[in-house]
Image: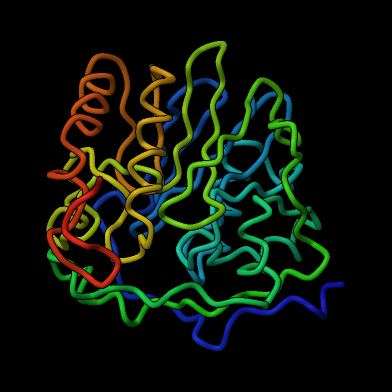
């Protein structure tokens, strides 16, 4: 029931932004990517059908912007069939309760994310000691306490299908979080990667502000299993995506995407893995 839904006590507005904030890009006729402050959400579905889903739910206090972008693309009073989460970090579920109440829609996530979405377990504390920039240093202020979506959140089907996303399959891509998932459509090799890898060096304030495009591993300050994170990137590169959208940074496609992903796999320990930090032993085996 709605009355059971609640954010953690540390849920709050985070004063961080980028030049891309408020900008939406139609990546494909049925894939729209929109930036809220420093994070992206996606709308999947053709605008003329009104049959669509929302991927992730932005930053805290971003419900009005997400609703506005949705109605601008799909028409007034349009609402998604569901909200599908790549994972439950604060910048991907920031407005989910307001959106669930407003739209009266279900939320889907991987079963290993359920403790973080039903009030049972907090995420591990961010690691501000990873070498990086100001965003990493700011990370102790990021919310980590679990939200409680009550009976509004459901597990993704075990067969890999995604409700209301025909043609897409979910892929378990842990590392950044235990139940992180990415979404892939084989027919046109479209990938929605969440934070399994991102298109900007998320730790560095200047690069976040300017959205300088540079493929990277998952955000370092919130990634706790680097062995799994590397395996997840390898799994996604093996799909040979032609178009990719991620949780942070601009969409990427074509040869630039292929070459960048190949390089990320080849040089993961250099590009993605921090040299030090409480979740890192310095090298992967």
The image shows residue 205 at horizontal and vertical percentages of 16, 63
Q: Most extreme residue toward the front, as rendered?
A: 285
Image quarter where the C terminus lies is top left
Image quarter where the N terminus lies is bottom right
Q: Closer to the camera, 210 or 249?
A: 249
Q: Residue at x 55, y 61 (%)?
A: 88
Q: Closer to the camera, 213 or 232?
A: 232
Q: Most extreme residue toward the top, as rendered?
A: 187
Q: Residue at x 34, y 42 (%)?
A: 197
Q: Quadrant of residue 49?
A: top right
Q: Residue at x 21, y 62 (%)?
A: 281
Q: Residue at x 74, y 76 (%)?
A: 5
Q: Most extreme residue toward the right, as rendered?
A: 1
Q: Closer to the camera, 129 or 226?
A: 226
Q: Quadrant of residue 142?
A: bottom left
The image shows residue 127 at horizontal and vertical percentages of 28, 73
Please tell me whether residue 193 is drawn above or below residue 144 in the rendered image: above
Please tell me whether residue 41 is drawn above or below residue 147 in the rendered image: above
The image's colour scheme reads rainbow
The image shows residue 143 at horizontal and vertical percentages of 45, 78
* 198 left or right of 241 in image: left
Please tell me whether residue 129 is drawn above or below residue 53 in the rendered image: below
The image shows residue 55 at horizontal and vertical percentages of 57, 45
Q: How many marks?
A: 0
């Amino acid at each position: 029931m709605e009355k059971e839904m609640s954010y953690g006590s540390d849920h709050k507005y985070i004063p961080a932004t980028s030049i891309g904030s408020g900008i939406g890009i139609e990546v494909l006729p049925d894939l729209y990517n929109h930036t809220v402050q420093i994070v992206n959400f996606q709308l999947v579905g053709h605008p003329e059908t009104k049959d669509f889903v929302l991927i992730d739910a932005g930053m805290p206090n971003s419900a009005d912007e997400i609703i506005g972008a949705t109605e601008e693309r799909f028409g007034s009073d349009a609402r998604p069939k569901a909200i599908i989460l790549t994972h439950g970090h604060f910048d991907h579920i920031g407005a989910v309760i307001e959106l669930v109440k407003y739209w009266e829609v279900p939320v889907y996530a991987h079963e290993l994310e359920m403790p973080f979405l039903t009030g049972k377990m907090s995420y591990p504390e961010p690691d501000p000691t990873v070498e990086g920039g100001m965003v990493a240093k700011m990370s102790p202020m990021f919310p980590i306490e679990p939200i409680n979506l009550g009976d509004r959140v459901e597990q993704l089907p075990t067969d890999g299908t995604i409700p209301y996303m025909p043609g897409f399959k979910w892929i378990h891509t842990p590392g950044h979080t235990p139940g992180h998932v990415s979404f892939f459509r084989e027919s046109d090799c479209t990938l929605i990667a969440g934070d399994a890898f991102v298109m900007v060096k998320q730790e560095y304030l200047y690069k976040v502000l300017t959205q300088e495009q540079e493929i990277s591993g998952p955000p370092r300050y919130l990634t706790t299993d680097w062995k799994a994170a590397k395996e997840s990137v390898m799994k996604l590169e093996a799909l040979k995506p032609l178009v990719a959208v991620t949780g942070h940074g601009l969409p990427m496609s074509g040869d630039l995407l292929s070459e960048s992903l190949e390089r990320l796999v080849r040089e993961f320990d250099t590009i993605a893995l921090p040299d030090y930090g409480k979740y890192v032993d310095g090298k992967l085996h």
